[in-house]
Amino acid sequence: MRTESCREWRESLGAYSLGHLASEDKAALEAHLEGCAGCRAEADSLDFVSRLLPHADPEHFGPAPVPPAALGERIATQIGAERRRGRQRRRLRRGLALSGASAAVAAVALAIFVLPGGSGGAPAQRVVFRSLPLGVKIAATLQPRAFGTEISMYVSGMHSGTLCHVYLREADGARFSAGTFRYRWGGNGEAVLSSALDLSQTAAISVQAGGHTFVAPVSPAGPSAASAPPPPPCSGCPRGTMAKVVRSAIDFAIEIQFLMA
Ligand SMILES: [Zn+2]
């Protein structure tokens, strides 16, 4: 049976088996071993080892085991790979968290680049109304926008206060309101309106004013398609410019994501 006192006795068993115990301690320990089978068994096993020790020849000890030469390198490689995986996982987590922000950045960048071209990519058009009453002049500049078309109206020669309704028309005659304005003497005669119809889908612009409707044709492909010679090649605007701009915007967003990671 092993007790708290056994634990204390067993601490001196090693010295006892090697014959290093003082005589008083040795007598007391032997008295305990007389009555304790557990400690006696422990003492016997230590005695066996201590009797073998004198036969151990240090000259015949084998060399201390040496780890394989590549082991350190393998461990370092493993640790490096694990660290990289950890960094990639953290980056991926941050990337996922940032993907919304990155998408927003990309959307902003794309909006900045794409908006001026509009969804139809049609160029801006200057439209001059013909067959107008004597002294009246109406002109408009149509700009493609993401929402449709922005219309700048220039009017002169009407009665001050004349209410003008402006519409954009598709080729089949469908009419999209661009809003209203009043012509005032003394003003610059310009009004900026907007319509939901894409400029690329616009066949005509009409102005209702003073009981008359004035219509001017709009070339969906722009004025150059009808009569003007093709524009000279632009060295700064090679083919695929929009694709490059989109790629740049995406690269920009990705770069920001990694800078923030
Ligand atoms: Zn004991």
Image (tube, rainbow, N blue to C red):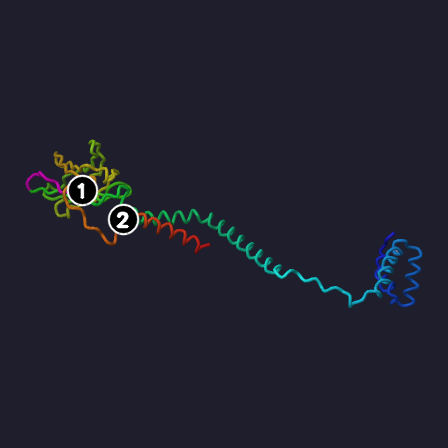
Q: Earlier in the sequence, mark 2 or mark 1?
A: 1
On the image, the x and y values in percent for residue 157 come to 9, 43
On the image, the x and y values in percent for residue 99 come to 44, 47
- Alpha carbons under labels 2 and 1: distance apart: 18 Å
Q: Which residues are magenta?
A: 125-134
Q: Secondary structure at mark 1?
A: helix
On the image, the x and y values in percent for residue 161 come to 14, 41
- Please, what is the three-letter code of the amino acid marked with disc 1? Ala
Q: Which mark is residue 70?
A: none
In terms of secondary structure, what is the magenta stretch mainly? loop
Q: Which mark is residue 225?
A: 1
Q: Secondary structure at mark 2?
A: loop
- Please, what is the three-letter code of the amino acid marked with disc 2? Arg
On the image, the x and y values in percent for residue 21 come to 88, 66
Residue at 9% across, 42% down: 136
Instruction: Choose between 54 and 242: the one closer to the eye.
Output: 54
Horizontal side, residue 240 vs residue 31: left or right: left
Q: Quadrant of residue 81?
A: bottom right
Question: Compared to 56, does 142 lie above or below?
Answer: above
Instruction: Choose between 216 and 85: the one closer to the eye.
Output: 85
Q: Residue beneath label 2, please?
A: 239
Residue at 92% across, 62% down: 28
